[in-house]
Image (cartoon, rainbow, N blue to C red):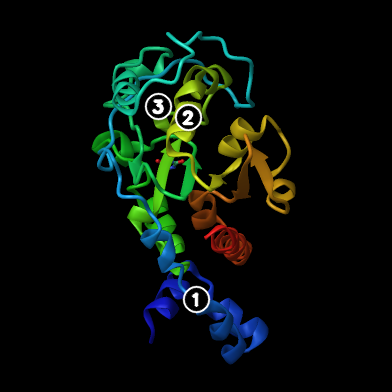
Amino acid sequence: MSRQHLLLRELGLAPRWRLRHGAALELESVSMPVLAPVAANLVPAATPAQPVVAVPVVVPVAEAVPAPAVVEPATTALPDWADLQQQVASCTACGLCQTRTQAVFGKGNPRARLMLVGEAPGAEEDKLGLPFVGKAGQLLDNMLSAIGLGQDDVFIANVLKCRPPGNRNPAADEIAACADYLRWQIAHVQPEVLVTLGRFAAHALLQSDAAIGALRRETHQYQGIPLFVTFHPAYLLRSPGEKAKAWQDLLAIRRALANKA
Ligand code: URA
């Protein structure tokens, strides 16, 4: 069994595709040309992929819909990458700084063509200081592998840099307090394609409160960068029936990268 077939099986896609469309057709469409060029096109990072740093954050416990910023950033100018990491590591802009182990800056290649944005660190991420290292992260790695992308081909960050206690949803004021960090990360990475994972990331970057199901059907723009909305891998773990839709999203992302290569 090929590596790709194994990955798709891990995603829960291989059996579904065989059942619906017939094995030959399905495996054919699955073994699309690998996007190896994504890695090849990367400019060697001027600054080596900076290991993740930590960030503190703020307060309340509420459902999050992007709200007007309630915390003024220390500066509105774009800090350099090292300063940004430092600011995140020592941030006290929201109450999450009191409960975090450490802030989670991001991981991957700061010159990547593809940047993914998740929601917030969970327990594992809080412990290790890296995003997407738990079960959802493993699924995300497999999803990226299935379209030929490895860790050096992407930069991954979260809307919130600090873990909400008990993995509760991010609160609006926490999202607002953290917004500049993500905006600055995107400004530094300057990805060719952005992908939001789940509703909090989509809502934060698109200033929308529409449902993921509606948002994922079109390509959006964030400051001129094509932005794709897809499901959060943790949601896919809970709702494996949605993996086929996520696979369609991955194919669209792969196409967008290929068209820009
Ligand atoms: N879920 C997220 O949104 N981000 C992480 O880093 C881990 C899980």
| Residue at the spot 38% in from the left edge and 54% down from the top edge | 42
- Please state which of residues 154 and 26 is positioned toward the viewer in this rendering: 154
Comparing labels 2 and 1, the label whose residue is closer to the camera: 1
Identify the mark at residue 187; answer none if there is no mark: none
Residue 64: quarter of image = top right
Residue receiving disc 2:
182
Q: CA distance from mark 3 to mark 2?
A: 21 Å
Mark 3 is surrounded, within 10 Å at the Cα level, by few (under 14), some (14 to 19) or many (20 or more) other residues, namely some
Q: Is residue 38 above or below residue 79?
A: below
Q: Amino acid at mark 2?
A: Leu
Q: CA distance from mark 3 to mark 1?
A: 42 Å
Which numbered disc flags the more N-terminal residue, 2 or 1?
A: 1
Which numbered disc flags the more N-terminal residue, 3 or 1?
A: 1
Which numbered disc flags the more N-terminal residue, 3 or 2?
A: 3
Q: Secondary structure at mark 3?
A: helix
Q: CA distance from mark 2 to mark 1?
A: 32 Å
Pointer 2 with pointer 1, Cβ within 8 A: no
Q: Position of residue 183 (x, y in %)?
A: 51, 28
- Relative placement, left or right, of 149 versus 240 is left
Pointer 3 with pointer 1, Cβ within 8 A: no
- Please state which of residues 182 and 83 is positioned toward the viewer in this rendering: 83
Mark 1 is surrounded, within 10 Å at the Cα level, by few (under 14), some (14 to 19) or many (20 or more) other residues, namely few
Residue receiving disc 3:
165
Residue receiving disc 1:
33
| Residue at the spot 37% in from the left edge and 57% down from the top edge | 138
Q: Quadrant of ligand 1?
A: top left
- Please state which of residues 159 and 232 is positioned toward the viewer in this rendering: 159
